[in-house]
Image (cartoon, rainbow, N blue to C red):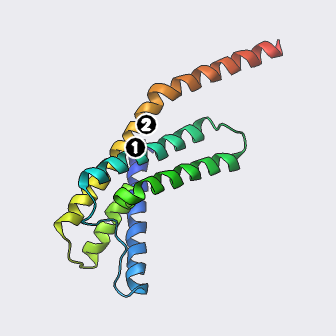
Amino acid sequence: NSPYKVFVMYYVAQVAGCVIGCFFSWLIYHGHIFTFVSSKYSNIGVFVAETGCTFIFVYNILIQTSNRYTSNPSISTGLISVGLFTAVNMTSTLSSGCINSSLALGHLLAKIFLNFHLETVEVAQTLFYMGGEFLGGFLAAYCYNLYFKPTLIETENENATNNESARD
């Protein structure tokens, strides 16, 4: 499987899960769906908050899954959870803390499928959410490949050399 195909399938599954969750929310809460969009949020604030905090969260995941500062997977999972907690709490006052573009898109699609009246601000802010989250993820991957991955490869090579020397 190509990485692009896996990405698309993963993204579609997340959007579908969000739409299904919104449908059940609509059923259980008698026509109400939680939304991230609010006219009190600045589109620039949404974009900046989502870009910065998505960067924090994704970079944290990349570092933990490739290097693991500890050999204990529970601690690594805890560190990833702290990264998510931090990112969502930092964005909660500026953009309602979405951090996931498929979640933003899923909410918008659920409202369309359930025939809610969409305002221009909802469509615009969803695009700002998605743009910020994609940019934050891209920047995290770029910085990881530029700064962290070369150091990781050097460390692995040094460890392999040291292990060979110790065997001799």
Residue at screen point 30% across, 65% down: 37
Q: What number is the disc on residue 123?
A: none
Q: Is residue 168 left or right of residue 6?
A: right
Q: What residue did someone put label 1 on?
A: 137
Q: Residues within 10 Å of mark 2 (few under 14, many from 20)?
A: some
The answer to whether the residue labelled 2 contacts the one labelled 1, judged by CB atoms less than 8 Å apart, is yes
Does residue 99 show up? no
99 left or right of 158 in image: left
* Label 2: which secondary element: helix
Q: How many circles with numbers are drawn on the protein?
A: 2
Amino acid type shown at disc 2: Ala
The kind of residue tagged 1 is Gly
Element type where label 1 sits in the image = helix
Residue 94 lies, in percent from the top left, at 35, 56
Quarter of the image with the C terminus in it: top right
Nearer the observer, 115 or 54: 54
Q: Quadrant of the N terminus?
A: top left
Q: Position of residue 24 (x, y in %)?
A: 42, 80
Label 1: few (<14), some or many (≥20) within 10 Å? many
How far apart marks 2 and 1 lie (CA) works out to 6 Å
- Residue at x 47% of width, y 32% of height: 144
Q: In this view, which residue lies farthest toward the left?
A: 120
The residue at which mark 2 appears reads as: 141
Residue 17 is left or right of residue 114, and the answer is: right
Choose between 163 and 57: the one closer to the eye: 57
Residue at left offset 29%, top offset 68% = 109
